[in-house]
Amino acid sequence: MEKEEKKYQEYIAGNILKILSSKNLKQAAIAPLAFQEPTAMSKILSCQRRLSVGELANIANAIGVTPVDILTWPEQYVPAEKNEEPAEVFLQLRLTKEKKDQVLKLVFGENNIEILNK
């Protein structure tokens, strides 16, 4: 392995080992769940063998995290909600009456009188 690739392999393997430790899991126990022989799993985690993206996904699934979580450990990726409530914003301005009318027209259009009278 090239030097840079080896550095990333070591980083990923280290994170997998940290996650296993934090979850009190043994690599021999998760190997079959990750579709790996225990010896192959050991070689991956000791950086004696390259880890493919598919294997990373299988290992992540076996230990109950996402591949992104392995890459960012101990931080975990949490996707933003797609149906978020609109943000509520309060803005306070000091304006002259003339400027106030102009701003209200800008915000509400020509209907500002109707909105204010309700």
Image (cartoon, rainbow, N blue to C red):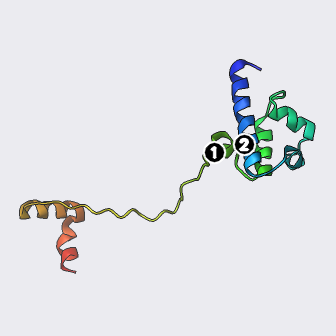
Few, some or many C-alpha atoms within 10 Å of disc 1 (few <14, some 14-19, many ≥20)?
Answer: few
Residue 18's tag is: 2
Q: Name which residue lies at 22% across and 81% down.
A: 118
Measured as percent of width and height from the top left, residue 95 is found at 11, 60
Q: Name which residue lies at 80% across and 40% down.
A: 55
Which residue ends up furthest to the bottom in the rendered image?
Answer: 118
Taking the image as shown, residue 44 lies to the left or right of residue 107, namely right
Q: Label 2 sits on what residue type?
A: Lys
Q: Earlier in the sequence, mark 1 or mark 2?
A: 2
Q: Secondary structure at mark 2?
A: helix
Give the total number of marks visible in the rendering: 2
Measured as percent of width and height from the top left, residue 4 is found at 68, 21
Instruction: Give the quarter of the image for residue 85.
Output: bottom left
Taking the image as shown, residue 99 lies to the left or right of residue 54, namely left
Q: Name which residue lies at 41% across and 63% down.
A: 86
What residue sits right under mark 1 in the picture? 74
Q: Name which residue lies at 91% across and 41% down.
A: 38
Q: Label 1 sits on what residue type?
A: Pro
Few, some or many C-alpha atoms within 10 Å of disc 2 (few <14, some 14-19, many ≥20)?
Answer: some
- Residue 30 vs 55, above or below: the answer is below
Measured as percent of width and height from the top left, residue 68 is found at 66, 44
Q: Secondary structure at mark 1?
A: loop
Q: Are marks 1 and 2 in contact (CB under 8 Å)?
A: yes
Measured as percent of width and height from the top left, residue 77 is found at 60, 49
Quadrant of the snapshot with the N terminus:
top right
Which residue ends up furthest to the top in the rendered image?
Answer: 2
Question: How far apart are labels 1 and 2 at the CA level?
Answer: 9 Å
Taking the image as shown, residue 8 lies to the left or right of residue 100, namely right
- Residue 66 vs 4, above or below: the answer is below
